[in-house]
Image (tube, rainbow, N blue to C red):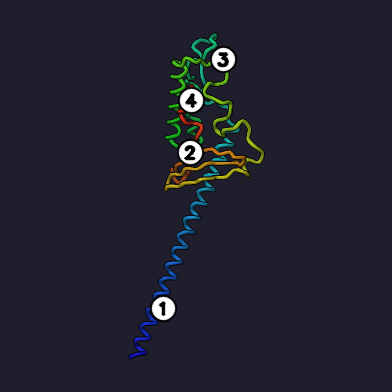
Amino acid sequence: MKKTALFIFLFFLIGYFTACRHAGNSKTHGRDSISSNSSNDSFELASLVVKVLKWSESDRQIDFNVTKTNSGDSIYSGIDWSTHKKRMADLSKTDFFTDDFLNNYNNIALHIDKELKTNPTKYLEGDIQPWSDDTNDWCKCQDFPDSIWEKLKIVDLISHGDSANFKWSWGDNYYYSVKTKKENGSWRISYLERFDIQKFSW
């Protein structure tokens, strides 16, 4: 009887420790899986940022091109809608941006057009754009630093399923805030810090 009781006790004891070991392994695998997905997302997002920056570096078009009512005027009176339409089409073709980003970009053009028509401070020919600080909005910089592609890192990454917010940095206390969405299996930019409509008032 004692041997039977001892056998039953040992059987349950072995089962208990086996279950605990499997539970511990399961938790470890869960952490590894989360870490792996986060690492993959970070790599894909960094790759997207590099593509956008390389594209912007070679891009020769002007964001929010403006026009004058008459060729002899010195004051810009609104957005040049013909060039803006082409710009919108070209941005869409890059496949880097979501519809949300493109809609916001178009709303910025509408906002600038209104500002040019109603703001008492006028945009004169030869002046810096009144909404600009003379830096490239795509990178918040005037010049790309050397070896930017090796230095660029994704920081403060917060991922929620098919959306992710983060900043990119190339050191020197530089950060640029971004929001992205995954569409058809690929990350695309839905928001860039320098294309916030609030920035385009003066």
- The secondary structure type at the circle numbered 2 is strand
Q: Nearer the viewer, mark 3 or mark 1?
A: 1
- Which amino acid, mark 1? Ile
* Residue that mark 1 sits on: 14
**At x 55% / y 37%, what residue is drawn?**
52
The residue to which callout 4 is attached is 200
Which one is closest to the eye, mark 4 or mark 3? Answer: 4
Marked residue nearer the N-terminal end (2 or 4): 2
**In this view, 95 is above or below 62:** below
Please report contact status of discs 4 and 3: CB closer than 8 Å, yes or no: no
Q: Position of residue 14 (x, y in %)?
A: 41, 78
Badge 3 density bin: few <14, some 14–19, many ≥20, Cα 10 Å: few
Measured in 3D between alpha carbons, the distance from the residue under mark 2 to the one under mark 3, in whole angstroms, is 33 Å
Q: Which residue has dot 2 on it?
A: 189
Instruction: Answer with the quarter of the image where residue 147 lies.
Output: top right
- Count residues near mark 2 (Cα–Cα under 10 Å), then give few for <14, some for 14-19, many for 20+: many
Q: Earlier in the sequence, mark 2 or mark 3?
A: 3
Q: In the rendering, which numbered label is found on residue 125?
A: 3
- Residue 23 lies, in percent from the top left, at 42, 67
Considering the numbered disc 3 on the image, is that residue within a helix, a strand or a loop?
A: loop
Residue 92 x %, y %:
48, 33
The front one of 120 and 168 is: 120
Question: Which label's residue is closer to the chain start, 2 or 1?
Answer: 1
Mark 4–mark 1 distance (CA, rounded to whole Å)? 69 Å
The amino acid at mark 2 is Ile
Residue 159 vertical placement versus 83 (above, below): below
